Amino acid sequence: MRILLVLLLVGYVATVHGNEPVDIGTRRELFTDSKLVQQIDGQLELRLHHPTPREIVMLHDEAWEGNNTTYHCVFKDGDLYRMFYVGRHSTLRKGQLNIGPSSFCYAESDDGIHWRKPHLGLCEFQGSRDNNIVMEPATAARYGARLGAPAVFKDENPRAKPDARYKMFLSGTNPLGMLPMKSPDGIHWSPMSDKPVVTDGAFDSMNLAFWDVQRHIYRAYWRCYSGGTTNAKEWKPLGVRAIRTATSTDLLNWKSQADLSYQSPGTTELYENGIHPYHRAPHLLIGLPVRYVDRAGAPSVSASDGSDRAGPERIRKWPDSLRALPDFELRCKRAALSERYGSALTEGLFMSSRDGVKFHRWDEGFLRPGIERPGTWNYGQQFVAWSSVETASPLDGAPNELSLYATEGTWLDKKGKAVRRYTLRLDGFVSAHASAKGGELLTKPVVFSGQRLSLNFATSAAGSIRVAIEHSNGTPFVGFSLEDCSPIFGNTLDRSVTWNNQQKLSQLAGKPVRLRFVLTDADLYSFRFCQTSNADRPAKNHDHTRDDSK
């Protein structure tokens, strides 16, 4: 299977037209797509990696939260980690699904691991303001909107005004669309418009935006369907769930609307999208969409007339593995309302883009449901929170790692929905991986700035990486051949490559070059040409605020 994947990848990159050098300057390059890959030989492949499950960081057990709390977004704001989410509780009684009122809530943390729910005193719930509710449905209704599925972001636009440092979209109701909101602190909100500013879509999933610091524009992403009608007057979606985007200079006037496209063939139902700039390489947009899969073949949209309800006879026809998954009795109760509530499964995917529209989507599951246990392997698990953040490693002296947050425990009657933290190596989404038999990766021509080449890599004790810098015709520059390169081994985020005990590359800067990476029992996650010999080494535990992407 992996050999086939490599062959397909080589075939794909070979079809890219032209060999004009790509100016990468001093930016960090990852292997999340094949943009810079010219050729792969030997036992080497681009391998998707999977986050490691860590602790439950939050349980939504307050009365205004519950087992259906969703639409989490997490970002770093100075020394503080901030989380926003929509709280709600669902119950199954007498064959009916009862969804409690929604509440837009806030939590914060000093380390991204231990979270607190501050008592904001803003909104009344059951006679008390002692809660962390930022906004309730009545307030949204006064703006002509529902809470919907907002994603708060801190506006990095240098022209953003003090009263609009934070922004998000509510779900406008007439017409259906995205209503922009602003805030000076992320807690107190006011509308930026008296009507939705984006109206072509379904908007029944997380509606998000952010300031693209590389291209100096706002980008928005939202839910659409491939067919049917979805507006305030008629709701008849058809086809599959998809993702739509547009750009803006002011968050009010939008243009260049397009549906996302992928290099991968086939149709995939995508919930959420989780798209955001990767902070260590902001020219890359990474996405963490949720894949929706129904293992019983049920329709992906619930029928308004109840014709898709599944009774015992229908459930007996389910695949044995579906029937063997956790919480079977509760799964049957959900299926009695709409079969897909019991038979559908969700998990996180990974994708990346360089232009915000065309994405390289990895169809292999990125954040899988994991080992079977109560509250897992269901419709609602592994909805990944928007954005990703650096957090300290628990290993003394180890560099920071990347933290992602995802949901579990959906639908459980008595418990609140949980948020689990997952960790990944910085830049560790995809690696150029070689077995012990070894392999090579040759880049397309690039032009760089800087004085040294830094690698983020890991080898076995016996493994190694060597690098040659070559002319476009494949001959190495004098002094920069594979034979001149000192074998690299270890496991670090920042190691300089040396040739004949030298690392300075200033004489090659500005010239078209190819990089030939030769790996044995090793993973190469990213590379970067740096200006100085000790430039921005990754933080170790104590400093997780620095963005060294510039």
Image (tube, helix red, strand yellow):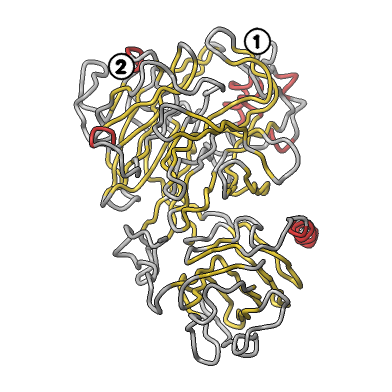
Residue 89 vs residue 331, the one in the foreground: 89
Mark 2 crowdedness (10 Å alpha carbons): few <14, some 14-19, many ≥20:
some
Is label 2 or label 1 in front? 2
The residue shown at (40%, 16%) is: 195
**Residue 259 disc label:** none
x, y percent for residue 272: 54, 34
Q: Amino acid at mark 2?
A: Thr
Q: Amino acid at mark 1?
A: Gly
x, y percent for residue 3: 79, 62
Q: On the image, numbered disc 1 is attached to which residue?
A: 306
Of the two numbered discs 2 and 1 on the same chain, state the one appearing first in sequence: 2
Say what secondary structure mark 1 lies in. loop
x, y percent for residue 37: 67, 63
Mark 1 crowdedness (10 Å alpha carbons): few <14, some 14-19, many ≥20:
few
Say what secondary structure mark 2 lies in. helix
The residue shown at (44%, 29%) is: 67
Is residue 51 visible to us here?
A: yes
The residue shown at (63%, 10%) is: 304
Residue 204 vs residue 419, the one in the foreground: 204
Is residue 420 visible to us here?
A: no
Q: CA distance from mark 2 to mark 1?
A: 33 Å
Displayed quadrant of residue 516: bottom right
x, y percent for residue 72: 42, 36
Left or right: 40 with respect to 537? right
Q: On the image, numbered disc 2 is attached to which residue?
A: 139
Residue 123 vs residue 253, the one in the foreground: 253
